[in-house]
Amino acid sequence: MHYGPYSVKTHLLSRLLSSASRAFIITTSSLSTKTPLISKLESLLTPTRHAGTFSGIKQHAPIAQLDQATSTVLADPSIDTLISVGGGSPIDAAKAISYRFHEQKGKYLHHITIPTTLSAAECTGIAGYTDASGTKVSVSSPEIIPHVIFYDSTFAAETPQKLWLSTGIRALDHAVESMYHPTATEVPAKQLCLSATAQLFEYLPKSKNEPGNQDYITKLQLAAFSSLYGLGLNIKGGLGLSHSLGYALGSPYGIPHGITSCLTLASVVRLKAERAEDAEQLARILPYIGQSRRGDDRADATRVGDAIEGLVKELGLETRLEDYGVGEDQIPKIAKMATKMEDGRLYDSVIELVRSKL
């Protein structure tokens, strides 16, 4: 991992597999056409090392674009490296392409990633994409975890503020839900998540007020890394209810995952506070966000939820599901997808949670 301003310019070429490596860039249309980042990256690689660029990855990585990019890579035997630039969609797309490449060719591709958001997709061996029915699906393997991460603040500085801040809440979602995940270890996972939570609470508001401050950008990038990387390969099952709701809301309704976390995380934490084991873990967060524990885990965990809601408001990220065309009639479908149930206490609680966000 490299971090800091101009780390890509300084170190990228040395992180290719060899002097003969040929790299294929996976990114989005907005980064390719609305910023100078991709053209600068192509120039840095030079025609000798640049095998091509696919800039058609859309939000939630639809399978049509993934198929197209995969076919392009498979057709060029000189490609040994993928460079993903952007948020979760191009990073996950590159991981999925490497997975498919292995299925066809028997080997994985070297993957260098340059994240421009705080979604932390670079920290896992899971590649999510949207199938033809609009459902989020995934493939996974330890071999598709990116080999090199560049947290270059000059790249992230090009990210629109709402996207930057909302993906910061997504990173917070990773950190908070890891605290009560049944297979998350105390070290390094939970300790890193507590540190990440503290940094996100401190630097997201500062970054909102000074969006060009590259020190704040770098601190937030490292916090996003800490929010998820420490889980390693120890995840069994989904990360948590807020993430499950995010998948139920994201691809089907075109809601960015940063925004789904803004919608769901605080309410999920309050719901989890009703369960003693979860409340005990959530209450540990309070000293890391400038508050003192009062000895009542349920009440303390509820205060964590209140603090998250307050942070979302402070960042100007409040939103309603109706803004994305989600109506009352969709609530049972969302609850079923998130809980894998059609009745019961949890299902009923999620019904009320989603209804409160209309």
Image (cartoon, rainbow, N blue to C red):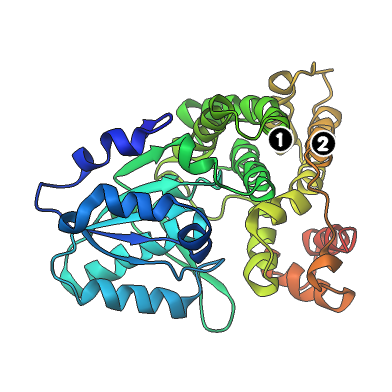
The residue lying toward the viewer, choosing from 239 and 124, is 124
Answer yes or no: do the residues labelled 1 and 2 have beta carbons within 8 Å? Answer: yes
Q: Quadrant of residue 283?
A: top right
Q: Residues within 10 Å of mark 2 (few under 14, many from 20)?
A: few
| For residue 289, above or below residue 279 | above
- Disc 2 marks a residue whose amino acid type is Glu
Mark found first going from the N terminus, 1 or 2: 1
Q: Position of residue 306 (x, y in %)?
A: 85, 36
Residue at 66%, 74% in the rendered image: 252
Task: Tell us which disc is closer to us: 1 or 2.
Answer: 1
| For residue 231, above or below residue 213 | below
Q: Secondary structure at mark 2?
A: helix
Q: Report the side of 329 relative to 214 (left or right).
A: right
Residue 194 in sight: yes
Label placed on residue 208: 1
Give the residue number, with chain letter if any, for mark 2. Answer: 314
Question: If the image is split into quadrants, where does the C terminus sit?
Answer: bottom right
Q: Secondary structure at mark 1?
A: helix
- Disc 1 marks a residue whose amino acid type is Lys
Residue 142 in sight: no
| For residue 269, above or below residue 76 | above
Label placed on residue 44: none
The residue lying toward the viewer, choosing from 158 and 82, is 158
